[in-house]
Image: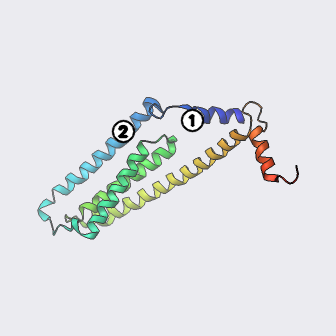
Amino acid sequence: KAHSIQSEIIPVLSEAPATAGGEKFSKRRLVVVTLIAVILSVEVLLHWTWLPYIENMRLLSLGGLAEIAIWLLLASVLVAVQTQRLPERIYWLLSVGLGIWLISQTADLMDEFLRQPLWISVYGEDSARGVGMFVVTLGLIALIRHSSAMLQELEFLSFHDSLTGLCNRRMFQKSIAAKGQDIF
């Protein structure tokens, strides 16, 4: 088991962040960001046709500023996910969930200064927000489990020899420290 742990963790720790993941990783990020940008642009264009119905520009109200803050937060988290080396499944769960959530937030933001059809507000925004939150939650649960497993494996590697699997000097010192100095 120690050999399989070493073959999985050591390359991850030794790769430089700039080249981590290689060509495949950067292409998929480009695809995700491009798709989200296209969908957000279509969202804005769909609402642009409703421009004659500009209401009282509630965008600068407290609610409008909160909507902008939420949109910026979601966008920054999505960018953060794109810049990290994550396992494939976790990456896609977080990217897709944040993308859907960001699209629903865009529709909600547009609602602050444009009159929208009721079906967009009721079905589009709320349904997409719920789906996005659910998928992000699945991604966060997977990320927590992955992090916990990685920490356990790293702890094992730090206290055991990678070739034999036997305890090393660090484990011996930890055991002595746990027993106390009285018995020696």
- CA gap between label 1 and label 2 equals 26 Å
The residue located at (73%, 41%) in the rendering is 159
- Residue 101: quarter of image: bottom left
Chain-order first, disc 1 or disc 2 = 1
Q: Nearer the viewer, mark 1 or mark 2?
A: 1
**Which sits in the foreground, 179 or 135?**
179
The amino acid type, in three-letter code, at marker 1 is: Leu
| Residue ID for mark 2 | 31
Count the marks.
Answer: 2
| Residue ID for mark 1 | 13
The amino acid type, in three-letter code, at marker 2 is: Val
**Which sits in the foreground, 149 or 103?**
149
Label 1: which secondary element = helix
- Position of residue 144 in the picture relative to residue 113 (left or right): right
Disc 1 residue crowd, few under 14, some 14–19, many 20+, Cα 10 Å: few
Label 2: which secondary element = helix
Q: Quadrant of the N terminus?
A: top right
The residue located at (14%, 65%) in the rendering is 54
The residue located at (76%, 35%) in the rendering is 165
In the picture shown, does residue 40 fall above or below 34? below
In percent of width and height, residue 77 lies at 40, 51
- Position of residue 154 in the picture relative to residue 53 (left or right): right
In percent of width and height, residue 35 lies at 33, 43
In the picture shown, does residue 67 fall above or below 173? below
In percent of width and height, residue 95 lies at 42, 47
Disc 2 residue crowd, few under 14, some 14–19, many 20+, Cα 10 Å: few
- List the single residue furthest toward the right: 183
Q: Contact, CB < 8 Å: mark 1 with mark 2?
A: no
